[in-house]
Image: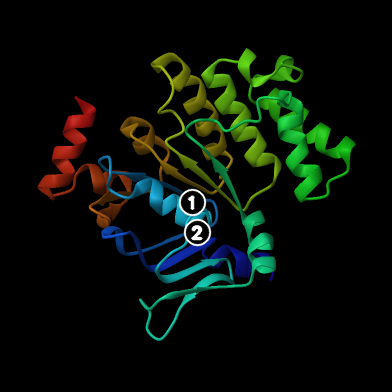
Amino acid sequence: MNSNENASMPVLKISHLSKSFGENEVLKDVSLQVMPGEIVSIIGPSGSGKSTLLRCSTLLETMDHGSLYYGSDPVCKAQGTENGPSQYVDKKTLARLHRYFGLVFQNFNLFPHYTVLKNITDPQTRVLKTPKDQAKQTALDLLAQFGLADKADAYPCQLSGGQQQRVGVARALAMKPEILFLDEPTSALDPELTGEVLKVLKQLASEHITMVIVTHELGFAREVSDRIIFLEHGVILEEGTPEELFSSSKTRVQEFIGKLSS
């Protein structure tokens, strides 16, 4: 596929996604797409389905109904109708499609017994089969970019939460994903450390890294997002540019924004 075609095709396309856990329907007929270089923030109250949406997008959970594509590659397709049961591709294809995306967790998920450098180089050499010297250079470049050049030989327990989260972002970016997902990347951090991580994410936004960010940091979402999605009770209640969303005529959206902004 040439770059012109790539530019006009969504990196991620989800159609009519539904997901239940037992009797609890967490996501109900959710559709969205993300274009190359776009930054999409997902906001909404606790229990609205934000993290489940990310987990379905990154194959940590399976969709019950609907379709999911990365570029032109299907991850799963709805059978019968557009909101029919999801049928996934085979395991070998799924393993390949994992390379499309990176995921940054709210609780860092670094390997505690690996140094910072090994946390970033190991996935490159194991999954991408990157030569060790090249993987190390990529890791060192990212650590320098994120102000962590002196932490390469440290272990996660020797780092602050903000530093661990920056290592998590570096590890995800080292895999050269088409799209980066971040699930509440600052929720485990105090305000000072939150600022460190948001600074890094703003830097990535300025480089037009494609990102989907679940966040409760409304000021940050307003500043960096091309589009904001408001999710509640498993449905998209509102979607638009930051300007459109923050001036929404929907009472529930204004109520939520007012509470978090006060």
Residue drawn at (70%, 45%) of the image: 175
> Which x, y percent locates residue 256?
19, 38
Residue drawn at (81%, 43%) of the image: 125
With respect to residue 229, does 78 lie above or below? below
> Which x, y percent locates residue 190?
41, 17
Where does label 1 land, which residue? 38
Q: Nearer the viewer, residue 206 or 24?
A: 24
Determine which quarter of the picture holds residue 242: top left
Residue contact between numbered discs 1 and 2, judged by CB atoms under 8 Å: yes
Query: Which residue appears farthest toward the front when viewing the image?
Result: 22
Q: Which mark is residue 110?
A: none
**Count of numbered circles on the image:** 2
Residue drawn at (44%, 28%) of the image: 186
Q: Amino acid at mark 1?
A: Glu
Is residue 181 toward the left or the right of residue 98 in the image? left
With respect to residue 205, does 65 lie above or below? below
Where does label 2 land, which residue? 35
At label 2, counting other C-alpha atoms closer than 10 Å, the crowd grade (few under 14, some 14-19, many 20 or more) is some
> Which x, y percent locates residue 142?
70, 30
Q: Amino acid at mark 2?
A: Met
- Does dot 2 land on a helix, a strand or a loop? loop
Look at the image and tell me in which quarter the C terminus lies.
top left
Distance in Å between CA atoms under marks 1 and 2: 5 Å
Look at the image and tell me in which quarter the N terminus lies.
bottom right
Is residue 169 toward the left or the right of residue 261 in the image? right
Is residue 131 toward the left or the right of residue 180 in the image? right
